Amino acid sequence: MLEPTVGYSPAPDRYDAMRYNPAGASGLRLPALSLGMWHNFGDITPWDQMRSIAFAAFDHGITHFDLANNYGPEPGAAERNCGRLIHQYFRAHRDELIVSTKAGYEMWPGPYGDHGSRKYLLASLDQSLGRLGLDYVDVFYHHRPDPDTPLEETMGALAQAVTSGKALYVGLSNYNGRQLEAATRVLADLRVPFVINQNRYSILDRTVEGNGLLEATERLQKGLICFSPLAKGLLTDRYLDGIPADSRAAHDPRFLHPVDVEHAHPTIVRLNEIARGRDQTLAEMSVAWLLAHKAVTSVLIVASKPQQVVDNVKALENTTFTDDELAAIDEASGVSGG
């Protein structure tokens, strides 16, 4: 049983400093920074900590809460906890929020709890809405391509999500440029408001530049929201002096392996020097670098404490780069030709 609504008064100036960018050619505008609820909104995180992070985000104009059916731990926990936050503190502000969720990874046993079938996607959306306690989500994504299901079936399920009133817009996640092209054609024929792609992108991970996704996103006038902008923490000051004893790399190589840290160390030291020359931290510069790209609509931040939200917002103070700075960043990260 959900607890009754509790009073919450967000900062009156919360919209003053945040930038809101259109998702492609649509009328949907997303904050330059969005709050990802991937790992720190599961049941292993204390409730007061989740609440303080959500408050800090909304108080700084971060109106987009990004989820997926499998976010936790355990899967489903992040949606359930976000629903509790909305019910208790943000119900009066629902129309100021963008709530997104996804389906595409395994959620329950058997052949109908994974991938991209119509049965799985629409059943998962109903389950997500139940956990969130909402009648609709603002954006519903297919979380990953499914080569074993006809594209027309998967895109048709996204269309049904919109026509049923359970989603306002749809998105795709982890698609490459060729897959995006094909999906766009089907969704356009179905007249579905497909507005956003979600993909991994950072100074250290340029996959979207090489697989056609970035180019196709711009040409087709779709939005791009980037996850893992700090490369699992490498693009912070956390690992500049090696691997701290209390870091994820030291205790949980599923997230970041010590070998990755050692390999990247010379690169992040050089990138940190460039950031210092801009009077930014490495993390601030890394977020700003993404936001400087005209194709990028929003950057997903993941925070374990409120101050990290505030620190990320500082990146908005300087998102302009000189050609020399961009060239130096490319050289430091091993990219030729920008």
Image (spheres, rainbow, N blue to C red):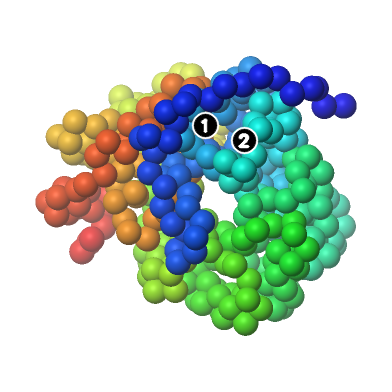
Residue 161, given in percent of the width and then of the height, sits at 74, 63
Residue 111, given in percent of the width and then of the height, sits at 85, 62
Residue 66, given in percent of the width and then of the height, sits at 59, 44
Q: Residue at x 44, y 74 (%)?
A: 220
Q: Residue at x 53, y 72 (%)?
A: 180
Residue 255, given in percent of the width and then of the height, sits at 54, 38
Instruction: Name the quarter where the C terminus is drawn.
Output: bottom left
Instruction: Name the quarter where the N terminus is drawn.
Output: top right
Return the residue at label 2: 93
Up the image or down, 164 lies above or below 125; here it is below
Residue contact between numbered discs 1 and 2, judged by CB atoms under 8 Å: yes
Q: Is residue 231 left or right of residue 323?
A: right
Amino acid on which the number 2 mark rests in the picture: His
How crowded pointer 1 is (Cα within 10 Å; few <14, some 14-19, many 20+) is rated as many
Name the residue nearer the viewer: 261 or 167: 167
Q: Residue at x 41, y 52 (%)?
A: 21
Residue 160 occupies which quadrant of the picture? bottom right
Amino acid on which the number 1 mark rests in the picture: Phe
Looking at the rendered structure, the number of numbered marks drawn on it comes to 2
**Would you say residue 162 is visible in this rendering?**
yes
Q: Residue at x 62, y 82 (%)?
A: 189
Nearer the N terminus, badge 1 or badge 2? Answer: 1
Return the residue at label 1: 58
Residue 114 occupies which quadrant of the picture? bottom right
